[in-house]
Image: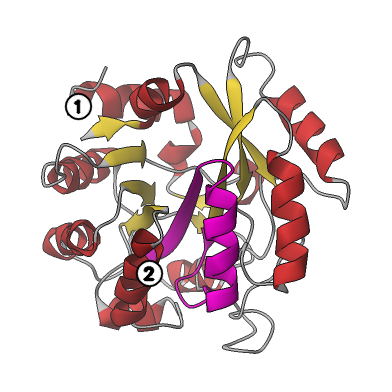
Amino acid sequence: MKLLSQYYQEKFGCKVYKLSLNGGFTCPNRDGSLGTRGCIFCTGSAEFAEGGKDVAAQLQRAKERVAAKSRGGKYIAYWGSFTATYAPVETLRRLFFESIQPEDIVGLALGTRPDCLGEDVLALLSELNAVKPVSVELGLQTAKEETARYIRRGYELPVYLDAVKKLKSRGLEVVTHIILGLPGETLEDMVSTTRAAVQAGTDGVKFHLLHVLKNTDLAEEYAQGKFECMTLEQYAACLKACMAILPEHIVVHRITGDGAKKDLIAPAWSADKKRVLNYLRKYLELP
């Protein structure tokens, strides 16, 4: 297992920072193709990302956001808002190629769904990957089908497994998002999800703490007392168990996630990001 900072240093020879961009994408879980309410935990807003039609302007604003900590580093153009491959391929081609054009952009990262990777999109990603490295992030969240239906993910596990296979066959890097603390899931369930991602061939994982945010259906479930959020100590223990089964080559891109503070309902402890990260690093004995 490697941490992302170490991996980037080895791969690019310098510090690398992600620039969060917004292509105005939607999602089949919101445009009526699969549903209109999104996943149960989704706010429907593009948090922490830039916006606007001018890609160069987005990149510049994103660089200004990270300027205090990015001196001497390079960047990855990160299209992570909603489903970044859910648009006409001509639109994707323009946005993605424009975003990797600057010399200080060393790679491209895309957040998407396994069921939004048609052959035309896969061909485009292969073309981009020949120019600069492409990393495709897939929102698995859970390998437990019962939970997947509850959160309204909209596809079954074999769709994810097939997507990983297709991406890997084209030499594309795959990162899998996993949510820890989903209602009704046990520690065994969360470890099983991690194991499923590893066995599928993922190159990296992003672990997320389940957040309850305003304006989500999950918030209603929480208000009705249908589930409780994990404590920091419980989350750390779950994270440790999941990371313990990761092979040496797997890159951990994230050990937790944070929602916008203005929208956070629970768990309250997650709002103190510095304290949380310090606690997790100490507990997990990370550098």
Does dot 1 land on a helix, a strand or a loop?
A: helix
| Residue at (60% x, 42% y) in the render | 261
* Residue position for label 1: 283
Disc 2 marks a residue whose amino acid type is Lys
The reply to whether the C-beta atoms of the residues labelled 2 and 1 are less than 8 Å apart is no
Mark 1, Cα crowd under 10 Å, few <14 / some 14-19 / many 20+, is some
Q: Is residue 194 left or right of residue 225?
A: left
Q: Quadrant of the C terminus?
A: top left
Disc 1 marks a residue whose amino acid type is Tyr
Does dot 2 land on a helix, a strand or a loop?
A: helix
Q: Quadrant of residue 250?
A: top left
Span shown in magenta:
111-140
Residue 114 belongs to magenta span: yes
| Residue at (44% x, 77% y) in the render | 153
Q: Is residue 227 left or right of residue 197?
A: right
Q: Earlier in the sequence, mark 2 or mark 1?
A: 2
Q: Is residue 109 left or right of residue 225?
A: right
* Residue position for label 2: 166
Residue 210 x, y percent position in the rendering: 40, 55
Q: Quadrant of residue 83?
A: bottom right
Residue 193 belongs to magenta span: no
Can residue 141 be seen?
Answer: no
Residue 215 x, y percent position in the rendering: 64, 66
Q: Which mark is residue 87?
A: none
